[in-house]
Image (cartoon, rainbow, N blue to C red):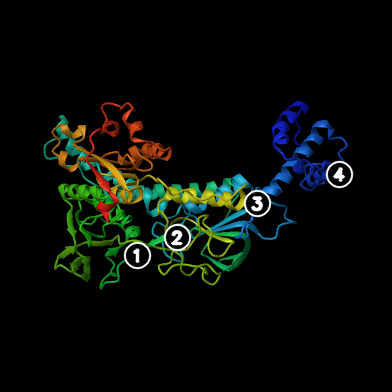
């Protein structure tokens, strides 16, 4: 067993014993605890003989903590009827189920929650995920790492990096650089896609190693829920105390004529096109749409962005939406706002004719639908197991990520709370603590910083102006717009890269006065800045904190500390 010198053990025990109530101390039973240790292979005898003074004290402390733990566990049992458990692992002889946790879905959230349960709480855990492939299918192709790693955040960001080099070469002329006469940079699209595929393949392997390192079992195949405690993978059944649904979402196309033509794709296929489209339509006005429109344009594709709203990015702050719309047009992306697709027809040479309800007709190489994602919850056996879902497939969960079936939890995009990878990671860790930790833990969805990797990018944290005015009654709004220092040199692109920064502060006389409740930015490095601002807002930063912070000069970021002039005050009545 672990041996502590008598003095050290007494030192460790003192604060525990001082804080323990008399009723708890009465439960300390060294002899009984010896049997407990022996059953777990710690003590070699049922007798305390040979343990010595430190060992007897150890047993007393264990007994005290055991009593406290039992008292705490009783407090954790409420109307919901579930109980937290500090350590999930038990001997095979005592185990009622094959696993403590079985996770369906090996994306970022599922892997993190599973690893956390195993490594932090000693749970016996398994993950089921389909075999790896660059483009996913519903039942046969997926891969550890999920959408974000294989066909989402990571490959998208890599392609965005590459798309900037053309304009960087153009910017260089404003700084005195020239290319030999008649020389133009050439893009090898196949080499680009192969390099991207190699990187996501490498990351897929890393996710497998992470599970292996945490002693999490990995089953490759399509998994379904059989009952509240049983999962089936490839015809084999496993029982589990808890089941986690972490199956994410899938891109969808609008049900219009021609949507099933080979040239019509979603984000999955768009990231793996074997040939660069010379002309592309992107349908949708959300963050995926503006990101893909930006990077394809950066590589030289003629891009047409079609969405039915007056502005892109519905749900974002209005100033952000307006500013980005102006910059997309300034960059040369063809923006068709207020239009909806009506049909897609085959044309010669593999091209298609895209038509809208406003009479627009475009002959293009590809049409990409970025019209949303649907929770990947169908054909998983959830309804049969008693899990309630909404009509769109969203798995309904409570504030602890638990479904209507007490033994089944769900995290990530399948729950449609905040569809961001870091949020799924946080939900996974909170779920593991709720299942196996000292107390139930709610994932915290307040003040989540995020970025849209449009060109230029967007960073945002907290509430929009309308949301903040509605919640707090009145807010003061600070806005600054400026040309970034890089483009004060003659690059010719200053208007394409103009920066917007916006801060929203609770007005004097209202509860929470002075607190910063929203920060929004359009411009270079917006995502990098917003990460730090997110920390400040999480800590409850006020406008005074920003004003008294010394800016770093010369940077764009220093403007967050110099916005002294209020642009306007907006009240709840103004936004009704």
- The reply to whether residue 299 is visible in this rendering is no
Q: Describe the element under mark 1 as helix, strand or loop.
A: loop
- State how far apart marks 2 and 1 are (Cα): 14 Å
Q: Are circles 1 and 3 on residues that touch, CB within 8 Å?
A: no
Would you place residue 141 above or below residue 569 in this image?
below
What residue is disc 4 on?
46
Q: In the visual, does 475 lie left or right of 340?
A: right
**Residue 332 seen:** yes
Tell me which residue sits at (70%, 48%) in the image: 71
Mark 4 and 3 residues: CB-CB less than 8 Å, in contact? no
Distance, label 4 to label 2, CA atoms, is 50 Å
Taking depth in this image into account, of 270 and 113 the one nearest to the observer is 113
Q: Position of residue 495 (x, y in %)?
A: 15, 41
The residue where tag 1 is placed is: 252
| Residue annotated with mark 3 | 75
Q: Label 3, label 2: how many angstroms apart (C-alpha)?
A: 31 Å
């Amino acid at each position: 067993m672990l041996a502590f010198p008598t003095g050290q053990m007494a030192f460790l025990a003192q604060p525990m014993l001082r804080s323990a109530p008399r009723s708890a101390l009465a439960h300390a039973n060294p002899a009984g605890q010896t049997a407990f240790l022996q059953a777990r292979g710690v003590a070699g005898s049922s007798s305390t003989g040979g343990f010595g003074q430190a060992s007897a004290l150890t047993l007393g402390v264990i007994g005290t903590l055991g009593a406290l733990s039992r008292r705490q566990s009783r407090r954790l049992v409420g109307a919901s009827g579930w109980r937290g458990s500090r350590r999930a692992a038990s001997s095979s002889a005592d185990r009622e189920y094959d696993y403590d946790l079985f996770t369906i879905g090996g994306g970022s959230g599922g892997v993190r929650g599973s690893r956390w349960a195993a490594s932090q709480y000693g749970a016996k855990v398994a993950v089921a995920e389909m075999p790896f492939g660059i483009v996913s299918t519903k039942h046969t192709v997926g891969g550890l790492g999920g959408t974000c790693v294989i066909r989402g955040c990571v490959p998208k960001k890599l392609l965005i990096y590459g798309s900037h080099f053309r304009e960087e070469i153009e910017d260089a002329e404003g700084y005195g650089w020239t290319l030999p006469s008649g020389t133009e940079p050439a893009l090898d699209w196949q080499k680009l896609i192969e390099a991207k595929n190699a990187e996501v393949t490498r990351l897929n392997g890393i996710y497998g190693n992470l599970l292996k390192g945490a002693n999490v079992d990995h089953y490759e195949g399509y998994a379904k829920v059989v009952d509240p405690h049983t999962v089936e993978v490839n015809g084999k059944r496993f029982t589990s105390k808890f089941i986690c649904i972490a199956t994410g979402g899938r891109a969808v196309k609008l049900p219009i004529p021609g949507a099933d033509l080979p040239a019509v794709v979603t984000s999955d296929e768009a990231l793996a096109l074997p040939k660069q489209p010379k002309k592309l339509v992107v349908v949708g006005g959300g963050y995926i749409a503006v990101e893909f429109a930006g990077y394809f344009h950066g590589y030289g594709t003629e891009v047409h962005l079609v969405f039915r709203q007056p502005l892109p990015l519905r749900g974002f702050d209005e100033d952000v939406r307006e500013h980005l719309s102006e910059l997309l047009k300034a960059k040369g992306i063809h923006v068709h706002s207020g239009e909806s697709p009506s049909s897609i027809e085959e044309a010669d040479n593999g091209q298609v004719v895209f038509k809208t309800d406003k009479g627009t007709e475009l002959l293009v190489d590809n049409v990409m639908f970025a019209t949303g994602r649907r929770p990947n919850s169908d054909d998983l056996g959830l309804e049969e197991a008693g899990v309630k879902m909404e009509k769109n497939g969203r798995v309904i969960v409570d504030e602890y990520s638990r479904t209507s079936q007490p033994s089944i939890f769900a995290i990530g995009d399948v729950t449609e709370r905040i569809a961001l990878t870091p949020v799924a990671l946080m939900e996974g860790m909170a779920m593991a603590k709720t299942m196996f930790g000292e107390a139930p833990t709610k994932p915290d969805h307040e003040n989540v910083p995020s970025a849209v990797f449009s060109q230029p990018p967007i960073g945002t944290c907290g509430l929009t102006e309308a949301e903040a005015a509605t919640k707090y009654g009145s807010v003061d709004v600070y806005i600054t717009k400026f040309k970034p220092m890089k483009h004060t040199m003659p690059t010719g692109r200053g208007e394409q890269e103009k920066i917007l920064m916006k801060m929203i502060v609770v007005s004097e006389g209202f509860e929470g006065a002075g607190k910063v409740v929203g920060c929004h930015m359009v411009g270079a490095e917006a995502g990098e800045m917003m990460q730090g601002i997110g920390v400040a807002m999480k800590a409850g930063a006020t406008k005074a904190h920003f004003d008294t912070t010394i800016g770093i000069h010369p940077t764009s970021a220093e403007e967050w500390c110099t916005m002294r002039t209020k642009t306007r005050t907006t009240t709840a009545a103004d936004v009704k």
